Amino acid sequence: MNYCILRTKKVKSRGHITQLALHNFRLRSQKNIDEKRTRYNQVLVNSLNVDTSSSTSLSQKVSEHYQKLGIREKSNNVLMLEFVVSASPQFFNSKSKQDIEKWAQHQVDFFQKEFDQQLKMAILHLDEKSPHLHFCVTTEHLSVKKYKNQKGEFHKETWSLNAKRYDKDFLVGLHTRHALHNKPYGLVRGVRGSVRSNTPLKEFYRAVDKAMSTDY
């Protein structure tokens, strides 16, 4: 049985955004990356026009985006959510590059439907043993306050950063919806309410790489 893999991590500092960019844009060498295949990686969404040759551009573009909205950042704000999407290693056996690109676009369609304009980046990595995508989602939230005075009824729109709505219940539902979206591929959801503990992303990459034996 082939499973959907959907992981998420909160990004709370610009240093973390830079580290994310270093990995996703392939601006540093890593043992698990086949640099001969890095040219096959694809940026599928880049609505902020981030310079992927710069480790700091993503952080700068996110800051500019929030500044344009008039957001006053707080020290405990979640600046971004990163999602990693893949599937059971055997799912990719015998699949061509075109097959995987079609699967990848299917994942982008799901995230665009879920997060709309908050989806800022989507990157497909094909230079590791297991194909996977990274999605970067910003956390801006629009609040509308209504008020009245002698001149009538008015409303005021205010932007802020708010990731609280992406709580455990939301993520559980997201995982379920993601599995349903991938039903045409024969992929299924993992066990809901599993007692297995979360695996840090570095360990996740290591485990997937180890399991994936097909080189295409």
Image (cartoon, rainbow, N blue to C red):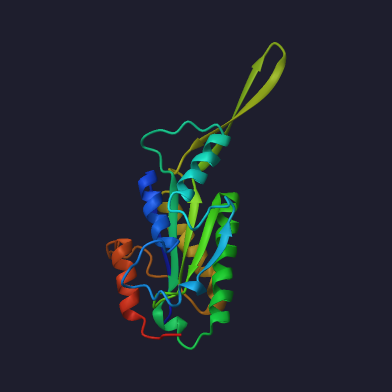
Can the viewer see residue 179 in this picture? yes
Residue ranking furthest to the bottom: 94
- In the foreground, 45 or 161: 45
154 on left or right of 4: right
Q: Nearer the viewer, residue 2 or 27?
A: 27
x then y, percent, for residue 86:
44, 71
In front of the other: 71 or 169:
71
Question: In the picture shown, does residue 54 fall above or below 39?
Answer: above
Q: Position of residue 107 (x, y in %)?
A: 54, 67
**Total label count?**
0
Relative to residue 153, is residue 50 depicted above or below? below
> x and y percent of residue 96 in the render?
53, 85
Quadrant of the rendering where the N terminus is positioned:
bottom left
Q: Which residue is rendered at x = 45% and y = 86% of the image?
A: 93
**Left-right relation of 82 to 42:** left
Q: Is residue 156 left or right of residue 132?
A: right
Which residue does the image show at 28% across and 66% down from the upper left? 203
Q: Residue at x 52, y 54 (%)?
A: 51
Residue sitting at the far right: 151
Place residue 148 in its image quadrant.
top right
Q: Which quadrant of the view contains residue 109?
A: bottom right
Relative to the observer, which residue lies in front, 152 or 162?
Answer: 162
Residue 132 against residue 171 in the figure, above or below:
below
Q: Residue at x 33, y 62 (%)?
A: 201
Can see residue 12? no
Residue 196 location in percent, x, y? 28, 65
- Say left or right for 133 vs 208: right
Q: Quadrant of residue 159?
A: top right
